[in-house]
Amino acid sequence: MSDMNTQAVARYRNNFLKEVEERVEDGHWVRMCMQCGVCAGSCPLGPHWEHSPQKIFMMIRAGKREEVLTSDAMWMCTSCYNCIVRCPRKLPITHIMHGLAHYSHRLGLAPKGQPTREIAKLFWDSLVKTGRVNELKFSLAMYFKDGFGQGIKNAMAMQGVGLGLVKAGRLNPMEILGGHACKDKGGIQKMIAKAQEIENRKKGLTA
Amino acid sequence: MAKKQYAFYPGCSSQKKASADNFLRSIDKVCEKLDVQLNEIPDWNCCGASIGYGEGGELPRLVLSARNLALAEQNMPGQDMVSVCPACWLASRETAERMHESQSLLAEANEALKEAGLNLKGEVKARHFVEVLIEDLGWDAMKAPVVKPLEGLKVAGYVGCQTNRPFGIAGESFENPKYLDKMVETMGAEPLTRYEQKVTCCGGALAFSEPEKAQKQIRDIVESAYDHGADMIVTPCQLCQANVEIYQSEINKKQGTKLNLPVVYYSQLMTVAYGGSAKEAGLDGQLIKAEKLEGIASK
Ligand code: SF4
Ligand code: SF4
């Protein structure tokens, strides 16, 4: 992982804007930002953002690579799309935030143990395994992501909710033995692997 | 009139025995009453949701939706794809539009789809069930089957984010969409049109990873509904429904509040207004019982 980072640093030297434009989803839009500040007031978890989207765009142009890619700011995005519909320059801000988070994750620079990073990974792993997200396994994995002891505590704290959902027929305890899955799991896995390969090729990312 | 047919993409949370199992039951009833036939896309897969970005890159996420679209094209030619989940709809529509606009992207997606034995032409449209109701059927058709107007029921219409942005329902504003209130009214209930948390974010998937921060959002959404005198909140979104209903008891525990407001789907209101039972409306699936609505259903 950090090899990928070394390679990226060598390739782009001091041109972080170019790196973002070539490698981050919708990164070519960053140039279009006119720093009006509208997006900065749009995020529901705004006070918890270390840097607002507006500031992140400014930092990218100022070449603050390390500061941007190691920040947990982008991981505060709830995908509410407030910013997208308000931006006077029509920047796909949500996608850029997702793209930056993903890129920092792939380079191994995203903060370790960042909770949204963790659940995003668990979610994707669950998806790739069966083609569908198995909600019970996903919830269990969530509870146990901080280790066994904490997992029991988390599960106990949410026990009422879990039992309530089981009783209401909205969480199926049988899922643990299998449950929701696509028939063509194999095909889906090969398809995803191929898509990843194409994307790596296009963006010059070596795994 | 012939039944309207659609390629149906239920999505992970609306499968049988998943967290929105009850939602689907009410959708079935609404379709029966309105002469709509939803044909489930065979072997559909997860859309990647909003949170898929962390691990999944751009193309891997797009091909997930491309596979569903390809299956729809192949198995239900000529039918629009319809989702009941905003996140599924968003992912599918974004993919459908991008594939339609860019031949090179479509070619890349097809290179990956080949591994799963599929090919996408890029012609199928991805739509939301609410669009089917409003655009294909219309308000009069929606009103026609009402046999039990939901009189005296005060409802806060909570639209949330992704049914509303970035695409939204045609002709509605992002800041103050009105269709949900109009649906409530069409079913004979009273919409609380001044409810100001209509399009506030519930925290989405971050309710799991950043519980404290998301619960602050949820508390505002529920308290404002109480302030307007709501008997219940109604929403078109599975994640909104789950977050806003499930975490009320958590917030009470931590903050000493007494939140206990039912959160139902528009299709549950419709089912009851159309004369369906509480069970057909999926009201047995509520964690916070929607007693007033159950009362009307059993009248
Ligand atoms: S709203 Fe758009 S133009 Fe304004 S600061 Fe944000 S990204 Fe830049
Ligand atoms: S989509 Fe993300 S970046 Fe945009 S306003 Fe919402 S939280 Fe902020």
Image: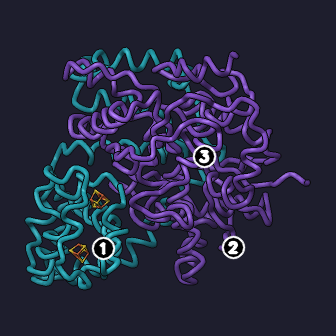
Residue that protrudes farthest toward the right in the picture: B1
Q: Which chain is cyan?
A: A
Is label 1 in a helix, a strand or a loop?
loop
Q: Where does residue A21 sit, x and y in percent of width and height?
A: 27, 81
- The residue carrying mark 2 is B123
Q: Residues within 10 Å of mark 3 (few under 14, many from 20)?
A: many
Marked residue chain, label 2: B
- The residue carrying mark 1 is A87
Marks 1 and 3 sit apart, C-alpha to C-alpha, by 30 Å
Q: Where does residue A72 sit, x and y in percent of width and height?
A: 16, 54
User: What residue is drawn where x is 45% and y is 54%?
Assistant: B162
Q: Say whether residue B241 is left or right of residue B279.
A: left
The numbered mark at residue B183 is 3
State yes or no: Cβ of the residue under disc 1 lies below 8 Å from any atom of ligand 1: yes
Pointer 2 and pointer 3 on the same chain = yes
Residue that protrudes farthest toward the front in the picture: B152
> In which quadrant of the rendered view does residue A85 lie?
bottom left
Task: Say whether residue A160 is visible.
Answer: yes
State yes or no: Cβ of the residue under disc 3 lies below 8 Å from any atom of ligand 2: no
User: What residue is drawn where x is 39% and y is 20%?
Assistant: A161
Is label 2 in a helix, a strand or a loop?
loop
As rendered, which of B95 and B214 lies closer to the eye? B214
Q: Specify the amino acid type for callout 1.
A: Cys
Up-down: is A70 above or below A17? above
